[in-house]
Image (spheres, rainbow, N blue to C red):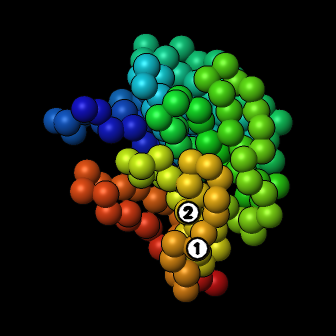
Amino acid sequence: GNLFVGNQLGNTITEITPGGVRSTFASGLSAPQALAFNSAGDLFEADDGSGNIYKFTPGGAQTTFASGLAFPNGLAFNSAGDLFETDPGSGNIYEFTPGGVQSTFASGFSFPEGLAFNSAGDLFVADGGNIYEFTPAGVRSTFASGLNYPIGLAFNSAGNLFASDAPSG
């Protein structure tokens, strides 16, 4: 029930309880960009400044899950436990198995950022002024276009997609 917030300017992850009590969960990071939890309760953080993805156990122990990325950004887990990551520096979306084996899921994006899976297992990707949808088989289609600059994506329990749309320019 706690909220975790990546603080890019402070290079920390803040934990906030339902009662509003704040504490530093992790520090010494380099521009934390995105956070995602796996089914085991481990927290994964896309560390924009270092090019790494870090894994934190529920107790706060930190390990490096992946390194050498151009600009790790959005994170999302599918139902099989694979981690997907947008990498705007390369224009790619990478997929990592639970054991950390990396492969390229899709490429050719201008600046991919936010990711979210719906209940059917479709992956949604924010890129430039568009949101793209990938079926579990990897078939890509345009879900929405003409947006300013969608960054964050999330589904609610009713299956509605929400996007934070930053101003262009």
Can residue 72 be seen in this snapshot?
A: no
Pointer 2 or 1: first along the chain: 2
Residue appearing at x 16%, y 35% in the figure: 19
134 or 60: nearer the eye?
134
Q: Which residue is mark 1?
A: 142
As rendered, which of 42 and 61 lies closer to the eye? Answer: 42
Residue 7, percent from left and from top: 50, 45
Confirm whether residue 62 shows in the render: yes
Which residue is at 47% across, 35% downward? 79
Tell me the element at label 1: strand
The answer to the question of whether label 2 and label 1 lie on touching residues, with beta carbons closer than 8 A, is yes
| Cα separation between marks 2 and 1 | 6 Å
- The residue identified by callout 2 is 133
How many numbered circles does the render carry? 2
Residue 128 to residue 46: above or below: below
The image quadrant of residue 127 is bottom right
Circle 2 sits in a helix, a strand or a loop, which is it? strand
Closer to us: 141 or 58 = 141
Residue at image coords 66%, 27%: 97
State the image coordinates of residue 112 (x, y, percent, origin top left). 67, 61
Amino acid identity at mark 1: Thr
Locate residue 92, reporting x and y percent. Answer: 76, 54
Q: Amino acid at mark 2?
A: Glu
